[in-house]
Amino acid sequence: MATMVRMRLAAAFALLLAVTGGAGEGPRRLSHRVWLLGGVPDEGALTNLRAAGVTGVVLPVGRVELGEGSCRFTLAQPADLSALAGWPVTTLVWVEGSGKASGDPESFTTQFTPVQRGVTKSEGLLLISRRFFPGLSGFATGVAARLHRPVEVALPAQDLTQHLPKGGWPRVRPVAVAFGNPAALGFPASTLQDDLAALDALDETRLPYRVAVVVAPRVEPPPGPGGGSLAMLSSGEAAAFNPGERGSVFRLRKPLDWGGVSLAVGQSVTVEMVDTATYHRDLGMLLRPVRPLLEGWDTVGLPNAEPTFGMSRGAFFEYLRGESPYPRPHVEAEWPGPTAMRVALTNPTAQASALATTGNWVELRFAGTEVRDVQLGDFGGMEYGRVGADDSWHLTVARDATAIRFFLVFIPPQARVTGALVTFLSRPRDVLARWHVRLGDGTDVIGPLEPVALSRR
C-alpha cells in the first residue's frame, strides 16, 4: 500500500510539474505567487521562494470602505520593501461595502497611486472582498480605467461564478478563492465539490483567471505573542482531542500557557489548518491540463516557521523542491534488558501527520513469548492484537497478543516520540515493526514491515 501511495503522489507531482512547465518544455507555464500576509519575510525566506520557482508576491497595503459616491482608504503600517527589490509585487487592498455602493474610484486612485509608486517592480493591484456586492464591480472597473491597467478582483469561487457576467468585467481579471482553508481569512467555508464545480463554470466562460488557495491556519483562541503549536496540544496529558465538523477541537485537561495567554482546565482550542498533503491534493485538482485559461495559482499566506499549525515554512519549501508531501518516519528500538524493549518513532522530515484518534500508530509484531507489561511513555494509547494470515488486525488481550499498536494523535515534524517500554515474559524469537500515518487529505500511508534488531543496548 505504501508503494501505491508513493506512486500516486509521484505521478501527481509529475503532472503538476508538466503543467507548470517545471520539467522540460510543457505546453504552458503557470505563474505562482505567494501572499505575504504576515509582512515582508527575511532574505533567507525570499531566497528559498525564488529557488522554489515562485514568480511573484502579493503584499497587503490597506483596505477601502465603499459608500455611495465616497470611499475611505486606510493605509496599512508601511513596511520596509527594500528586501523585495527585483520581485514582481502585486499590491492588495481589502474592499468592504454593501449593496450598490461603488465608492469613488477617482478619489481612491489618487490616494493609492503614491503607494504603488513606492513599489519598485509593481505588477498591479488586487482588490479582494469576502463576498460579492453589486457596487464592487463598478468600483473595480472604475479604478482600472483610471490606473490605465488591468485590476484583479478576488472573490470566493462560487460568488465569482455566480456574478461574473459573460465576457467578464472590463479591464478586470478574476481571481477565485478556492480550496485550502478560506475560513481562516473570513471567507465562507466551502466543500471541495462546490469549489470544483465553480472552477468548471469559470473554465466555460473562456476568460483567463487565477486561483488563490488559502493555507493560513485559524486557531481559536489564538495563542499569545509567544506562539503555540499542535505539539503543545496533542499530548494526551495536555488535552483531549475530538475531530470537529470543521477543524479539530482540544479540551484542556490541565492549565496551559498558550504563548503567554493562560488557558484553564476544560477550555477548548479549535484548530483549522492545511497540511502539505492537503495542499498537494488541492493543487492536483487545480492544475489540470483541462483548464487552458488558468494563468496560475496563489498560495495565500507564507507559512510560518516551526512550531506552527499545519504546513510549516520548511515543509512548504521542501514540497516545492519536489520532495514528498507526507512524513517518512521510522521505528527505532533498543533493548535495555534481556526481555525489555524501548520503542521510539522518529520523523526526520519537515512534514507532519494529520490529527487522528487511531490513524497514527506504531505496530510491533512478536513471536514465541507473551507481554508482561507495557508503559506508554510519550505515546497516547495502545491496544493488543493478533494479526491474521491476510494481515487483518483482531483485538485481543495481553496473554493472546502477537502484536501491539501504539497510537499518537499527531506526529510532529522533525521530532522523536519516545518512551514506550515493552517487557516480555521471555525474549521473543523475532520482532517486526511498521508505522501507519494518517494524512490531512484523508489518505493513509503504511511503512514497510521490517525486523527490529535484538541486540542489547
Image (cartoon, rainbow, N blue to C red):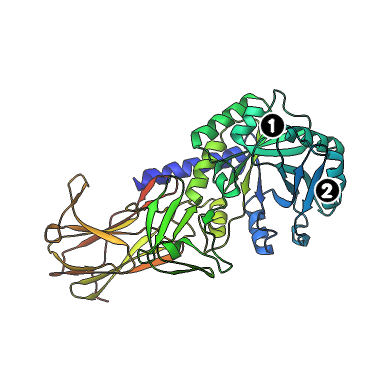
Rendered-image quadrant of the N terminus: top left
Question: What separation in Å lies between label 1 and label 2 (alpha carbons)?
Answer: 26 Å
What kind of residue is marked 2?
Phe
Horizontal placement of 308 versus 39: left or right?
A: left
Residue 291 percent coordinates (x, y): 60, 31
Question: Disc 1 marks which residue?
Answer: 208
As displayed, is residue 73 above or below residue 235? above
As displayed, is residue 405 above or below residue 444? below
Q: Is residue 174 visible?
A: yes
Horizontal placement of 265 versus 272: left or right?
A: left
| Sequence-earlier tag: 1 or 2 | 2
Q: Quadrant of residue 66?
A: top right
Of tags 1 and 2, the one toward the viewer is: 2
Residue 219 percent coordinates (x, y): 52, 56
Residue name at image x 51 percent, y 45 percent = 280
Camera-nearest residue between 358 and 286:
358
Residue 136 percent coordinates (x, y): 73, 35
Dot 1 crowding, Cα within 10 Å, few <14, some 14–19, many 20+: some
What kind of residue is marked 1?
Pro
As displayed, is residue 201 above or below residue 227? above
Q: Quadrant of residue 142?
A: top right
Residue name at image x 75 percent, y 56 percent = 76
Q: Secondary structure at mark 1?
A: loop
Camera-nearest residue between 224 and 217:
224
Task: Give the label on residue 384, or none.
Answer: none
Question: Disc 2 marks which residue?
Answer: 112
Horizontal placement of 291 versus 372: left or right?
A: right
Dot 2 crowding, Cα within 10 Å, few <14, some 14–19, many 20+: many
Task: Tell me whether circle 1 and circle 2 mark residues in contact (CB < 8 Å).
Answer: no
Q: Secondary structure at mark 2?
A: helix
Q: Is residue 290 visible?
A: no
Q: How many marks?
A: 2
